[in-house]
Image (cartoon, rainbow, N blue to C red):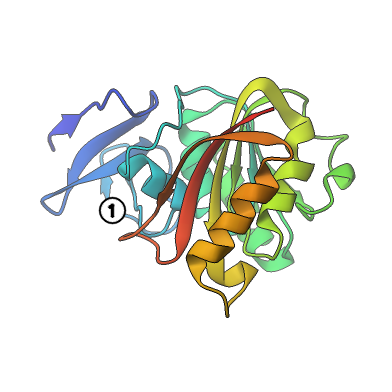
Amino acid sequence: MSDSKKDDNLPAGVERRQFGGESRLATQGSPVYGEPTDGNWRCWDARRSKLAAMLEREMDTELQGDETVLYLGGASGTTVSHVADFSGATYAVEFAPRPTRDLLNVADSRNNLFPLLKDARKPATYAHVVESDVDVIVQDVATRGQARVACENRQFLADDGRLLLAIKARSEDVASDPETVFDRARESLKEAYEIVETQRLEPFHTDHLGVVAVPR
């Protein structure tokens, strides 16, 4: 049996376990994309997940486990499947039909994961489905106006909830210096949020900024 370690900074249901001689994040659930496993535990690769990178960087996510989550940018389910492993109801919004089909397969073994083929830039189209006052919004959308997306989805977040946002500089403006892009995004977020913490997500993700924020 592999050694395991519970980190006080990690939510319940997430542990550090040994995979290939390296301590890695892990959650308990059905493997979905061939990641290494240790019994019921599946490796959560920070190089494939911005949220895992935020946890590896020890950002102040305040995730406890069992939260209600709105996940914007569900893609094929790489990260949101891990989130659903330790969270309560998890709504996953994804715009593209092809990855949504994969996301539906991921949801088959997770009764608390609800895929939505919707555009995160148009929250009115799924407001009738997502419950109000979710505990956490996790956002990883590769589009222009990432801060605007976060502000427009503020309506779903409880007043004491948290936004966990990954900003991809190259999706905003491929020609600008990433720090300039991040500064603009921070300024835009101030419309709806107070920023608690930001960190670059290197070495796991190049030109990405992790943001923790709370509603104003």
Q: Please provide percent x and percent y for residue 79.
A: 49, 49
Query: Is 203 situated left or right of 174 in this image?
Result: left
Is residue 56 at all visible to an observer of this figure?
yes
Residue where numbered disc 1 is placed: 36
Query: On the rendered image, what quadrant is the C terminus found in?
Result: top right
- Vertical order, 187 against 69 (above or below): below
- Vertical order, 25 against 136 (above or below): below
Q: Nearer the viewer, residue 209 or 84?
A: 209
Query: Is 208 situated left or right of 202 in this image?
Result: right
What residue appears at the point 44 percent right and 53 percent down from the top-left corner? 49
Query: Is 137 situated left or right of 50 in this image?
Result: right
Is residue 92 at all visible to an observer of this figure?
no
Circle 1: residue type: Pro
Displayed quadrant of residue 112? top right
Q: Is mark 1 on a helix, strand or loop?
A: loop
Q: Nearer the viewer, residue 43 or 8?
A: 8
Judged from this view, the residue extending furthest toward the top is: 160
What residue appears at the point 51 percent right and 72 percent down from the top-left corner? 177
Q: Please provide percent x and percent y for residue 48.
A: 41, 59
Q: How many residues crowd around disc 1 within 10 Å: few (fewer than 14), some, or many (20 or more)? A: some
- Vertical order, 107 against 28 (above or below): below
Q: Which of 39 and 89 is in front in this view?
A: 89
What residue appears at the point 43 percent right and 58 percent down from the top-left corner? 33
- Vertical order, 159 against 3 (above or below): above
Q: Please provide percent x and percent y for residue 44.
A: 36, 47
Displayed quadrant of residue 61? top left
Query: On the rendered image, what quadrant is the N terminus found in?
Result: top left
What residue appears at the point 38 percent right and 23 percent down from the top-left corner? 12
Q: Please provide percent x and percent y for residue 148.
A: 74, 51
